[in-house]
Image (cartoon, grey):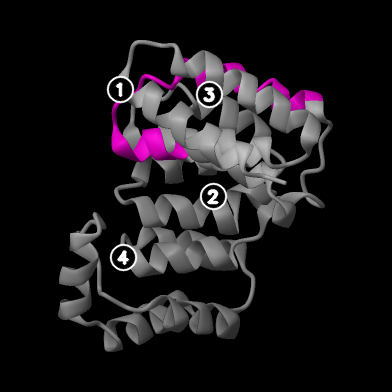
Amino acid sequence: MTASEIVAALCAQADPKNVAGMARYGISSAGTLGVPMPVIRRLARQAGRSHSLAAELWASGIHEARILATIVDQPARVTRRQMNQWARDFDSWDVCDEACQNLFRYTPFAWAMAAEWASAKREFVGRAGFWLMAGLAVKAAAKANDAPDEDFAALLPLIAAAATDPRNMVKKAVNWALRAIGKRNPHLRRAAIAAAENIRAIDSPAARWIASDALRDLRAVK
């Protein structure tokens, strides 16, 4: 399928009611068609993997086409420049999360960009940094991004440094990163709990929420 064929197929499935419903969950209505994810994933399977197709779909500016681009792109061909360009385009949490989940965490630059974006001023770029940390820690990414415990432990100071960020989209991602690292194994769980206890002592509502939620989750792990 060509980019124009995919865009036409997405437009044929447009649903304004879905757009309104998505907006209630904080998803931007700009360039959004309201196409359900099962339809997007079906079109992605039909299209197959293609780096050039992904670039065309992203350039369309259409919300669903950009999500589809994150599915069909080829991680080995993604550059740091592309990652930065796409991250600057993020205007909604779902596009940010899909890009990290489907594509960015499998690239050779996932670790470097996670650290670089952790201090980003743009809200969704910052969110992407911590989502990448969480994504690297989970089992789905283990084969592509296997790393020693020390590499994950080195991310904990970055998490602590961002724990006072009051922005909801960043705050939640910081929390996810802390919990995901702590759930990787018993050694990292102890390190994450210690980090969470230090974060809880910070005089910040965001830090207290991040720490309390993470401690409750990590201490419940058997």
Mark with earlier residue (1, 3)? 3
Taking the spot 34% from the left edge, 81% from the top edge, the residue there is 10
Q: Main secondary structure of the magenta part?
A: helix
Taking the spot 43% from the left edge, 22% from the top edge, the residue there is 163
Asked if labels 3 and 1 touch by Cβ distance under 8 angstroms, the answer is no
Where in the figure is residue 174, as x and y percent of width and height? 47, 33
Mark with earlier residue (4, 2)? 4
List the residue tagged with mark 1.
205
Asked if labels 4 and 3 touch by Cβ distance under 8 angstroms, the answer is no
List the residue tagged with mark 2.
100
Mark with earlier residue (1, 2)? 2
Q: Secondary structure at mark 1?
A: helix
Q: Which residues are magenta?
A: 150-173
Where in the figure is residue 143, as x and y percent of width and height? 82, 52
Mark with earlier residue (4, 1)? 4
Mark with earlier residue (3, 2)? 2
| Quarter of image, res 156 | top right
List the residue tagged with mark 3.
159
Q: Secondary structure at mark 2?
A: helix
| Quarter of image, res 210 | top left
- In the image, 181 versus 19, the foreground residue is 181
118 left or right, relative to 30: right
Q: CA distance from mark 1 to mark 2?
A: 27 Å
Mark count = 4
Q: CA distance from mark 1 to mark 3?
A: 15 Å
Q: CA distance from mark 3 to mark 2?
A: 17 Å
